Image (tube, grey):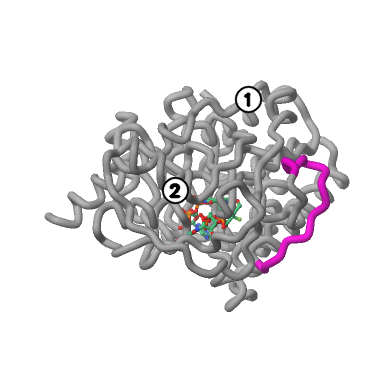
Amino acid sequence: MQKILVTGGLGYIGSHTVVGLIEAGFDVVILDNLSNADKTTLDRIAQITHHTPIFFEGDIRDTELLSKICLKHPDIKAVIHFAGLKAVGESVAHPLKYYDNNVVGSIRLIEAMQKHHIKNIIFSSSATVYAPQKEAALREDDSKTPSNPYGQTKWMIENILKDQYGSDPTWRISVLRYFNPVGAHGSGLIGENPKGIPNNLFPYIAQTASGIRQKLNVFGGDYPTADGTAMRDYIHIDDLVKGHIAALKYSSDHKGYHAFNLGTGKGTSVLEAIKVFEKTNEVKIPYEVTARREGDIATCFANADLAYKVLGWKATKNLEDMCRDHWRWQQHLNQCRSH
Ligand code: NAD
Ligand code: UFG
C-alpha cells in the first residue's frame, strides 16, 4: 500500500481527494493547520471510508514538524500539495500573507522532501496563472500573466518546482491547473463550506436557493457571450479527484516535470448555471444582473487534451451532476445549522 502525504487534506479538494485515495487503496497522512478547515472533516472522511487517516495538525512552514512526519513515516512515496490560501481579493489586500503561506510554505515542503528523498509531488495550481485570453480554450503552453498575488504565488511555485526538477532530474512533478471545481461528495457529508459571504458562484447560488441570501448578483450582463454573462469551465470535484489519482499513477512510472489542465473543456455561462441548478433541484434562485466584478474576464475554459493524452484522464460528470451534488451538500449544511 503506497503512503501519500496530503497537505491541506482537510480542505475542500483535499478531503475529497483523501477519500478517493483511501478508496483507491492508498494509505494517507494528512498535514493541515486548520486555517480553513474543520477537524470534524476527519470524522466525515472516516464515516465515508471506514478508515481514519493519520492526521498532523500543523503548518507546512514548520520545518521541524515536516522532519518529524518524514522520519515517522519513511515510507511516504509522494506528496499531494493542496495547502494554501486561495482568496483572490484577500491576496490583493494582504499579498505578503499569501507569498509567505503559499510560496515560503512550498519551499519549506520541497526542502523537506529533498532532504528525506521523497521526490514525487502533485501540486494544486490554477487556471488563474494564464493571461486573460482570447475566446479559445486555454492550452498548457499559452502565455501566463497572473493578475493578482494569489495567481502569482501559483505561478512562482510552478517555476520553483520546474527549477527543482532542473537541478535534480530524478524528481517527478505534476502541476495540475484546476479550472472551477464545484459539487460535493455523493454522500453529502463533505463539501465546500466557505466562511462568511461566498465569493464563488456555486456556493452563492446554493445559499440563495436555501434562502440564506436574498438574491444572487450576476456580475455583468454585457460580456461578448451568447447571453451576455461570463463563462467558466466548472468541473465536478469527483472528476478532479480522479485527475489526481491518474497523475499519481502516471508519476510512479515516469520521472519529469509536467503541467496539465484539469477542466471539462466546456464553458458555462452564469445564467446557464442558474437555470440548470433551478431545474435539476426544483428550486428558485432570485437574481439580478449587476455591474461586472472587477478583475473578471469574459470566458475561461480549458483545453484538457493533454491530460487525456498523457494521463488517460477526462472529466465525465456534467453540469446536472454538479448542481445536484452541490445542492445535496448545501441541504446537509442547512440541516446542521438548524440543529
Ligand atoms: P481549502 O481552503 O478548502 O483547502 C486548503 C487547505 O489547506 C485548508 O484545509 C487549510 O486549512 C490548509 N492550509 C492552508 N495553509 C496551510 C499551511 N500553511 N499549512 C498547512 N495547511 C494549510 O481550498 P481548496 O479549494 O481545497 O483548494 C486546495 C488547493 O487548490 C489550494 O492550493 C488552492 O489554491 C488550489 N485551487 C483551488 C481552486 C478552487 O476553486 N477551489 C482552484 C484552483 C486551485
Ligand atoms: N459570479 C457571479 N455572482 C457571484 C459570484 C460569481 O455572477 O456572486 C460570476 C463571476 O463573475 C464569474 C463566475 O460567476 O463570471 C465564476 O465566478 P467564481 O468566483 O465562482 O470563479 P472565478 O472563475 O472568478 O474564480 C475561481 C476561483 C479562483 C481561481 C479560478 C480559476 O475563485 O481562485 O476560479 O481556477 F483562480
Which mark, by number, is residue 313? 1
Q: Nearer the viewer, residue 1 or 252?
A: 252
Q: Residue furthest right?
A: 166
Q: Which quadrant is home to the C terminus?
A: bottom left
Q: Residues within 10 Å of mark 1 (few under 14, many from 20)?
A: many
Rendered position, 72 above or below 23:
below
Quarter occupied by residue 264: top right
Can residue 325 be seen here? yes
Q: Nearer the viewer, residue 274 or 308?
A: 274
Q: Residue at x 47, y 57 (%)?
A: 200
Residue 338 position within the rendered picture, expressed as x and y whole percent measured from the top left: 14, 56
Is 144 within the magenta?
A: yes
Judged left or right of residue 33, residue 247 is right
Judged left or right of residue 248, residue 5 is left
SS at mark 2 in the image: helix
Residue 76 position within the rendered picture, expressed as x and y whole percent measured from the top left: 58, 36
Which mark, by number, is residue 12? 2
Which mark, by number, is residue 245? none
Q: Residue at x 43, y 60 (%)?
A: 36
Q: Amino acid at mark 1?
A: Trp
Q: Residue at x 40, y 43 (%)?
A: 275
Is 77 within the magenta?
A: no
Pick whichever of labels 1 and 2 is earlier in the sequence: 2
Q: Amino acid at mark 2?
A: Tyr
Q: Residue at x 37, y 36 (%)?
A: 185
Helix, strand or loop: magenta stretch: loop
For label 1, being within 8 Å of ligand 1 is answered no
Rendered position, 298 above or below 9:
below
Give the magenta range. 136-149
Ligand 2, by image quadrant, is: bottom right
For label 2, being within 8 Å of ligand 1 is answered yes
